[in-house]
Amino acid sequence: MHTLSLLTVLGIVAAGQPAATPPKPTTPPAAASAAQPAGGPFRVIKSFDVGGDGGWDDLKVDPEARRLYVPRSTRVMVLDADTGAKVGEIADTPGVHAVALAPELGKGFTSNGKDDSVTVFDTKTLKTIQTVKAGKNPDAIIYEPATKRVFVFNGRSNDATVIGAEDLAVAGTVALGGKPEFAAVDGHGTVFVNVEDTSELLRIDAKTLQVEQRIPLAPGKEPTGLAIDGAHHLLFAACNNEMMVVVDAESGKVLATPAIGKGVDGAAFDAAGGFALSSNGEGTLTVVATGGDKPFTVVQTLKTAPRARTMTLDPKTRHGFLPTAEFEAAAPDKDGKPQRPAMKPGTFRIIVVGT
């Protein structure tokens, strides 16, 4: 994933075996039928005016505890997922990118890019339990429940550090052969991760720590966001050449490549409606129906806000959370090249979308 602090200007871009006909979701998606509500299934509901200093990256929602974890450069802000009110903070997480949760263990994990570490915290008190060393620039992080392991994907060492969520010991390292981006799990011992610079999707056995398959995403290039429909064994890789690559998670076959917006970073899957979503830095949310008479077609392009390019989705409420802020115009340096723009104080907010 790409932190907002890496942007310089808005335009920078930083699954049963399937039958002959693609599978339909358990709950038929409303937007896949002919009778659609005007404009599509999603809308902007509200905005949380959060404020505060620091860039941001990948949000994480805890649907049961009703908490929203927001990485903010040096710490993680913890908000009420329904009201946006601040309920606490996880301190001392330098260069934090993302959060993973092991709810049955009462533990959370942050990937701290600036000091190559993982902060383990108590999800009730938000107090640090332990700090674990990772690879270089840990970025995406995910909890695999079948093995009770945490996979930390390191952007500069091109590998994954695997940590036991119970004993907090490093179980091993997985060489990835490229720069990892977002990851997903099927809940049964398999981890999937996008590799941005090789335009591949890797399947990893969470028990043996072996890469079982390298799936080419062509014609997709530079994949970032990744979402999974575990019930139908489908993966959705959001790529920076403005397409979402739909992959059969069992065979590795590319099934479809619907068009998405510019500057994508995040992706999500709305299981209740059967929609795959991509959050795009141009200021849009692309909604793709995965079932119905015309599966894997774009049914909505929702206007959000510029730089709202990453997201998390609450499966209970079907609310998506997309962070953004306003920035000053980028002033040129002494050579006339645009410098990194500064965020306007107090403008950080989280856009909430829903059905």
Image (tube, rainbow, N blue to C red):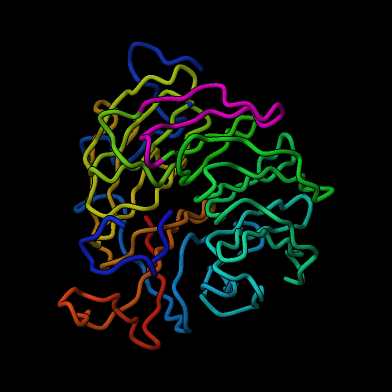
Please indicate whether residue 184 sits to the left or right of residue 247 in the image.
Answer: right
Boundaries of the magenta span: 196-216
Q: Up-down: is 295 above or below 277?
A: above
Please indicate whether residue 10 sits to the left or right of residue 169 in the image.
Answer: left
Q: Position of residue 346 (x, y in %)?
A: 40, 87
- For this orientation, the residue located farthest to the front is 335
Give the residue displayed 40% in from the left and 76% down from the top. 349
Characterize the magenta stretch by its predominant secondary structure: strand
Give the residue displayed 55% in from the left and 49% down from the top. 154
- For this orientation, the residue located farthest to the top is 20
* 268 vs 140, nearest the viewer: 140
Q: Up-down: is 88 above or below 18?
A: below
* 212 inside magenta stretch: yes
Q: Quadrant of residue 201?
A: top left
Q: Up-down: is 305 above or below 24?
A: below
Q: Position of residue 327 (x, y in %)?
A: 29, 80
* 5 inside magenta stretch: no
Please indicate whether residue 189 sits to the left or right of residue 306 in the image.
Answer: right
Give the residue displayed 47% in from the left and 40% down from the top. 271
Q: Position of residue 126 (x, y in %)?
A: 72, 71
User: Is any part of residue 39 visible from this angle?
Assistant: yes
Give the residue displayed 39% in from the left and 63% down from the top. 322
Q: Position of residue 36 (x, y in %)?
A: 23, 44
